[in-house]
Image: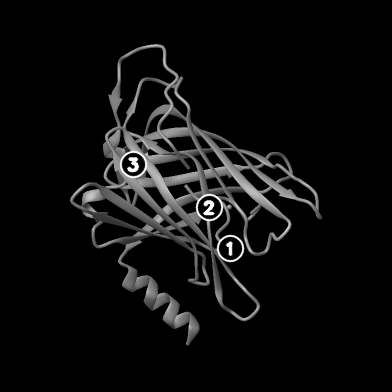
C-alpha cells in the first residue's frame, strides 16, 4: 500500500477484469473497516526482520458524504512529518484513488506539495473471480527535487487466495495479493533507471492491510512490514511531542 520512493515511493480509471468465468466472490469485508474509521486511526507498521528500521505510520480516516464514502490515507515516517496524502473513493465494485499529494521539505524547512497524475486508479476490488484478474495501479509525478525528470510507479496486483493472520494474539481470516511493479525514474541529466519489484499484501477481515512486502531482487533492498498497533492520532501526536521536546 505504500508508494515506494525510498527508491523514490506508496492510480486510476476503473477496474480491469481479465477472467474466464462469471463466478464472483465478494471480498469487500477485507478492506479497511470504512464505516468504523470516521474518527480515524493510526496504523503502525514495522519491519518483520529488522527492529532497527524506523516504523511507518499511516493515518486512515473515512469521510462519508451524501453521495459517496471517501477514504483518506496520510503517511508519516518516524520524524512525524507527513510525506504522502491519498484520497480514495468507494464505488460499487471497489476502491479507486482520486488524488495523491506528495510532500518534500526544502532547505528552509518548508513543505512543498506535488500532486500526482493518476493513470490507473485501481486500489482494491470488491469482487474477484479467481487469480486470473489483474488490477493495475499507476501514477506519475515530478517532485521539486526532480527538476529534470519524473517518476512513474506501476503496481500490478493479482488476487492469490485465502490465508489467516495473527494480530495481537487473535487469528483473523485474511486474503492476499501478489504484487509486481516498477519505479520508472526519468532524468535528462542523471539518466534513467527502472527498478522492478515483487511483493505481497495481506488484508485481514475487520482490520484492512496488515502486511506488505516489497523485494527489489538479489542484493537489493527488501521490506516486510507488519501491523503492530492501531491507535488514535492523539497518541501519534504525543509521540511527536516527546520526540521534539
Residue 97 as seen in the image, left or right of residue 192: left
Q: CA distance from mark 3 to mark 1?
A: 26 Å
Residue 223 as seen in the image, left or right of residue 44: right
For the residues carrying marks 3 and 2, which lies nearer the camera in this image?
2
Q: Which mark is residue 116?
A: 2
Q: Judge by depth and name the residue closer to the eye, 71 or 233.
A: 71
Circle nearer the N terminus (3, 1) = 1
Q: Residue at x 69, y 39 (%)?
A: 217
Q: Which residue is mark 3?
A: 204
Where's residue 131, x and y in %? 44, 22
Dot 2 falls on a residue whose secondary structure is loop
Dot 3, how many residues are within 10 Å of its Cα: few (below 14), some (14-19), or many (20+)?
many
Dot 2, how many residues are within 10 Å of its Cα: few (below 14), some (14-19), or many (20+)?
some
CB atoms of marks 3 and 2 within 8 Å: no
Q: Which mark is residue 27?
A: none
Circle nearer the N terminus (3, 2) = 2
Where's residue 212, x and y in %? 48, 45
Q: CA distance from mark 2 to mark 1?
A: 31 Å
Q: Residue at x 65, y 78 (%)?
A: 107
Where's residue 50, x and y in %? 58, 56
- Establish if 91 lies above or below 86: above
Q: Give the mark count.
A: 3
- Establish if 230 lies above or below 201: below
Dot 3 falls on a residue whose secondary structure is strand
Q: CA distance from mark 3 to mark 2?
A: 29 Å
Where's residue 230, x and y in %? 33, 59
For the residues carrying marks 2 and 1, which lies nearer the camera in this image?
2
Q: Which mark is residue 52?
A: 1
- Establish if 101 lies above or below 109: above
For the residues carrying marks 3 and 1, which lies nearer the camera in this image?
3
Q: Judge by depth and name the residue closer to the eye, 171 or 118.
A: 118
Q: Residue furthest bottom?
A: 245
Amino acid at each position: 500500500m505504500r508508494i515506494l520512493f525510498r527508491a523514490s515511493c506508496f492510480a486510476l480509471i476503473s477496474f480491469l477484469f481479465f477472467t474466464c468465468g462469471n463466478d464472483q466472490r465478494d471480498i469487500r469485508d477485507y478492506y479497511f473497516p470504512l464505516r468504523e474509521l470516521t474518527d480515524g486511526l493510526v496504523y503502525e507498521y514495522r519491519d518483520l526482520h529488522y527492529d532497527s528500521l524506523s516504523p511507518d505510520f499511516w493515518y486512515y480516516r473515512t469521510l462519508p458524504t451524501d453521495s459517496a464514502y471517501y477514504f483518506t490515507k496520510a503517511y508519516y515516517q518516524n520524524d512525524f512529518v507527513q510525506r504522502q496524502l491519498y484520497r480514495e473513493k468507494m464505488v460499487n465494485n471497489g476502491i479507486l484513488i482520486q488524488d495523491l499529494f506528495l510532500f518534500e521539505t526544502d532547505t528552509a524547512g518548508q513543505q512543498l506539495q506535488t500532486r500526482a497524475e493518476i493513470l490507473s486508479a485501481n486500489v482494491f476490488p470488491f469482487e474477484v473471480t479467481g487469480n486470473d484478474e489483474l488490477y493495475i495501479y499507476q501514477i506519475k509525478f515530478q517532485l521539486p527535487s526532480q527538476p529534470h525528470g519524473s517518476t512513474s510507479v506501476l503496481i500490478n496486483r493479482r488476487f492469490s487466495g485465502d490465508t489467516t493472520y495473527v494480530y495481537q494474539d487473535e487469528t483473523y481470516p485474511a486474503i492476499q495479493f501478489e504484487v509486481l511493479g516498477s519505479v520508472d525514474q526519468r532524468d535528462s541529466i542523471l539518466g534513467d533507471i527502472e527498478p522492478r519489484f515483487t511483493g505481497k499484501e495481506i488484508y485481514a477481515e475487520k482490520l484492512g492491510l496488515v502486511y506488505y512486502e516489497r523485494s527489489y531482487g538479489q542484493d537489493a533492498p527488501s521490506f516486510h512490514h507488519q501491523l503492530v498497533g492501531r491507535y488514535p492520532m492523539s497518541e501519534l501526536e504525543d509521540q511527536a511531542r516527546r520526540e521534539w521536546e
